[in-house]
Image: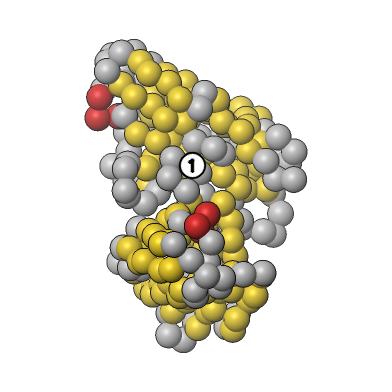
Amino acid sequence: GAVVSQHPSWVICKSGTSVKIECRSLDFQATTMFWYRQFPKQSLMLMATSNEGSKATYEQGVEKDKFLINHASLTLSTLTVTSAHPEDSSFYICSARPGTDSYEQYFGPGTRLTVT
Amino acid sequence: GQNIDQPTEMTATEGAIVQINCTYQTSGFNGLFWYQQHAGEAPTFLSYNVLDGLEEKGRFSSFLSRSKGYSYLLLKELQMKDSASYLCAVLDSNYQLIWGAGTKLIIKP
């Protein structure tokens, strides 16, 4: 159990375009979902925390107008990278936390974004 | 500020034992996680410690000392597939995960 999927697994887009990444919890309801970014040879960097039905909480330095997060249901959160630039190229990973006493996060497989 | 320290890289031999240390200074403590991450993949859960002591799970064990702000992950009978990065993360007083930079473990035959 506790499977999280992400789509797409990799995407290449042109500079200036927008890209949407989906994160789904397949066999549990996720009251909270997290979006991370990871550059090569670096650790995970939390971008934002989203709770179903409310606005996401962004970490300091993350532009909320550039990285749009929508947590429309208990099983789906989306991250849209708007007006993508080459420096946005990174590995984006989502995780989901069930609405239980456990604080373990279940990670999706990640999305490799390359902006040309 | 909040800080988690772990070695950047370690090398060990197949079949041997290796201990990866993690020290932390965080605002509050609600548990410590260890995750394994293979290159290009998402992290996978290994262990969670919230009380002092050793938790054993097969070839992997995790130890916690809250008074010392210290944890270690012990890997026994190393296999080549154990080559990966190992991430230490602490759940702070706001139940936010604070991540270490990860330790890259290289296993040599």
**Residue B67 position (above or below residue B40):** below
Total tally of numbered discs in the picture: 1
Q: Residue at x 46, y 73 (%)?
A: B18
- For label 1, the residue is B41
**Residue A39 position (above or below residue B58):** above
Nearer-the-camera pick, A103 or B5: B5
Q: Residue at x 32, y 41 (%)?
A: A39
Q: Is residue B51 left or right of residue B102?
A: right
Q: Which image quarter is the C terminus of chain A in?
A: top left
**Residue B1 position (above or below residue A90):** below
Check disc 1 and give the amino acid type: Glu
Nearer-the-camera pick, A114 or B4: A114
Q: Residue at x 45, y 55 (%)?
A: B84
- Give x and y (percent) for residue A111: 46, 31
- Give x and y (percent) for residue A102: 67, 59
Confirm whether residue B62 shows in the render: yes
Q: Residue at x 50, y 83 (%)?
A: B65
- Give x and y (percent) for residue A57: 45, 42
Q: Which image quarter is the N terminus of chain A in?
A: top right
Confirm whether residue B32 shows in the render: no
Instruction: Report helix, strand or loop for mark 1.
Output: loop
